[in-house]
Image (cartoon, rainbow, N blue to C red):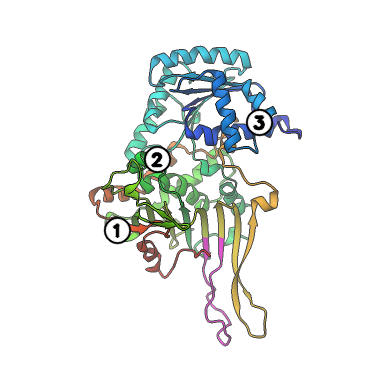
């Protein structure tokens, strides 16, 4: 537990957390470390308990031992004997198939017993760390069992992981389905990118610093790049990924969330409705590529065999559980325009892919070059554009790239970086984001969670791309594993006289 004193108003109230899929990778790698982190920082009420639900047969004690072993392996900096004992007293497990009425009958009995034992006062969140096909059925079962009923003193919330739908139609259907059981303010659609410190800092950077706000428009900005790249392949998720692909997996959620924070107008407050109202306006302002322009403005790629860090890497089609003739994209790059006064004429270039040269997530704001410079009679022949680089992973921070004079007799210029890194300045690296998001859910703070209209607007922005690809499955470029993606992605910017940020 945290040694420093924690203000009482920052500590959560009593609650019971029920995690469906408690034996899965998400719970192991993200949810339990997030809960341990909150407990370490003294932010959890002592009146709480966690009940895991999963198929595997285990007792409460066996599950506690599993969690302790996982924490020692994956988050040793969070694991102490004190915290282990703290959670051992509050961790429970229910084996069962959560598609059956029998399991929910047993769940009802366990919830009543655990709630009385730990004085949770009826408050509960239900985390759906499951395959998307279970979202609707679990929500309906929760409703049928009476677990979603609230009153002025009791809250009930459901946290739903991505992917939320496969396209606009399925997202609308899922929203309608779960809203027949839950009110919108009970639904917490989680996107862990929004829990990251640097993502949240985009709004602070823009609206709390007078030097940036006046320049944040088409008057000064030439274009915006958003890149989310991975060195990993599909690993053990080939079956899922071959049904999803890079566009579905990343664009309407993670990358569009970054886009909205970069592009939104200043909200009246940082409250949940004010923030999300401005974010959804940006999503609605996206001008999707017309069907005839998809081939020109969207690049779809799949990795072939190659090498990375000196090691050979197999082609995507050779990965486990992937169709040997798969046309699923592992890379996508696209050019979007936002049709409003602030961003008219400023292209947004977005890209994401697997098995690329470097793992990174960052936003690059590239400013226009000065319209006039007095360097014609000097050795300076070209000026590098200024850039503001917001690094979200792996080394969270912010950099500014600008020109300066090289020391010496002659006037020569070079581009230099002014860097800020969270870990260096604050003494500890930012967390994954799940701790912040769980904490916000427990306090009923929905700012960093996606609303139904935001989800649907994100899918609407890529609808023509999905429809065009469905009609033409030949539009697939190849790129070697360990590269920066297809050459066509470079050409996407080169046609406009631009290029992706170069990495040393």
Residue plotted at (37% across, 68% down): 495
The label on residue 237 is 2
Cβ atoms at labels 1 and 3 below 8 Å apart: no
Cα–Cα span, label 3 and label 2: 31 Å
The residue carrying mark 1 is 295
The residue carrying mark 3 is 39
* Badge 1 or badge 3: first in the primary sequence: 3
Residue plotted at (58% across, 30% down): 69
**Residue 193, horizontal then vertical, whole percent:** 52, 44
Residue plotted at (38% across, 48% down): 246
Q: Could you tell me if residue 4 is visible in this image?
A: yes
Residue at disc 1, secondary structure: helix
Report if residue 236 lies within the magenta region: no
Residue positioned most to the front: 311
Q: Is 171 displayed left or right of 4 in the figure?
A: left
Give the number of marks: 3
Callout 3: 10 Å neighbours few (<14), some, many (20+)? many
**Residue 71, horizontal then vertical, whole percent:** 59, 33
Residue at disc 3, secondary structure: helix
Report if residue 379 lies within the magenta region: yes
Q: Which residues are magenta?
A: 365-388
**Residue 54, horizontal then vertical, whole percent:** 46, 24
Q: Could you tell me if residue 439 is visible in this image?
A: no
Q: Which numbered mark, 1 or 3, is in the foreground of this view?
A: 3
* Badge 2 or badge 1: first in the primary sequence: 2
Callout 1: 10 Å neighbours few (<14), some, many (20+)? some
Q: Which numbered mark, 3 or 2, is in the foreground of this view?
A: 2
| Residue 317 higher or lower than 109, as above or below | below
Callout 2: 10 Å neighbours few (<14), some, many (20+)? few
* Badge 3 or badge 2: first in the primary sequence: 3
């Amino acid at each position: 537990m945290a040694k420093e004193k924690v203000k009482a108003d920052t500590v959560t109230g009593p609650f019971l957390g029920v995690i469906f899929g408690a034996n899965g990778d998400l719970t192991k790698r993200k949810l339990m470390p997030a809960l341990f982190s909150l407990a370490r920082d003294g932010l959890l009420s002592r009146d709480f308990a966690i009940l895991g639900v999963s198929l595997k047969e285990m007792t409460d004690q066996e599950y506690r031992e599993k969690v302790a072993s996982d924490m020692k392996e994956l988050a040793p900096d969070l694991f102490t004997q004190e915290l282990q004992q703290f959670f051992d007293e509050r961790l429970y497990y229910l084996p069962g198939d959560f598609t059956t009425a029998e399991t929910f009958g047993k769940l009802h009995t366990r919830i009543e017993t655990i709630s009385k034992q730990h004085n949770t006062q009826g408050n509960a969140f239900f985390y759906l760390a499951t395959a998307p096909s279970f979202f609707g059925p679990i929500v309906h079962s929760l409703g049928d069992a009476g677990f979603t009923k609230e009153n002025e003193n009791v809250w009930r919330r459901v946290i739903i992981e991505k992917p939320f739908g496969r396209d606009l139609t399925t997202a609308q259907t899922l929203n309608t389905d779960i809203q027949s059981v839950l009110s919108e303010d009970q639904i917490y659609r989680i996107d862990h990118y929004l829990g990251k410190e640097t993502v949240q800092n985009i709004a602070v950077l823009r609206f709390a610093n007078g030097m940036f706000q006046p320049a944040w428009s088409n008057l000064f900005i030439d274009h915006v790049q958003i890149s989310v790249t991975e060195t990993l392949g599909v690993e053990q998720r080939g079956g899922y990924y071959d049904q999803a692909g890079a566009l579905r997996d990343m664009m309407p959620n993670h990358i569009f969330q970054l886009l909205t924070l970069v592009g939104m107008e200043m909200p009246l407050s940082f409250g949940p409705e004010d923030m999300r109202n401005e974010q959804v306006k940006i999503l609605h302002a996206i001008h999707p590529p017309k069907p005839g322009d998809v081939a020109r403005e969207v690049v779809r790629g799949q990795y072939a065999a190659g090498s990375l860090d000196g090691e050979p890497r197999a082609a995507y089609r050779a990965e486990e559980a992937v169709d040997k003739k798969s046309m699923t994209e592992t890379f996508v790059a696209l050019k979007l325009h936002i049709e409003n006064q602030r961003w008219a004429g400023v292209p947004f270039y977005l890209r994401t892919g697997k098995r690329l040269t470097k793992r990174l997530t960052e936003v690059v704001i590239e400013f226009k070059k000065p319209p006039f410079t007095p360097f014609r009679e000097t050795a300076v022949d070209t000026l590098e554009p200024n850039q503001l680089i917001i690094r979200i992973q792996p080394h969270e921070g912010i950099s500014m790239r600008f020109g300066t004079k090289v020391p010496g007799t002659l006037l020569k210029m070079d581009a230099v970086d002014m860097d800020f890194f969270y870990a260096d300045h604050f003494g500890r690296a930012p967390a994954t984001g799940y701790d912040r998001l769980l904490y916000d859910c427990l306090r009923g703070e929905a700012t960093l969670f996606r609303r139904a209209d935001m989800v649907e607007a994100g899918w609407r922005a890529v609808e023509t791309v999905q429809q065009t690809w469905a009609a033409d499955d030949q539009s697939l470029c190849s790129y070697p594993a360990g590269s920066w993606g297809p050459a066509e992605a470079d050409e996407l910017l080169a046609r406009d006289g631009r290029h992706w940020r170069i990495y040393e």
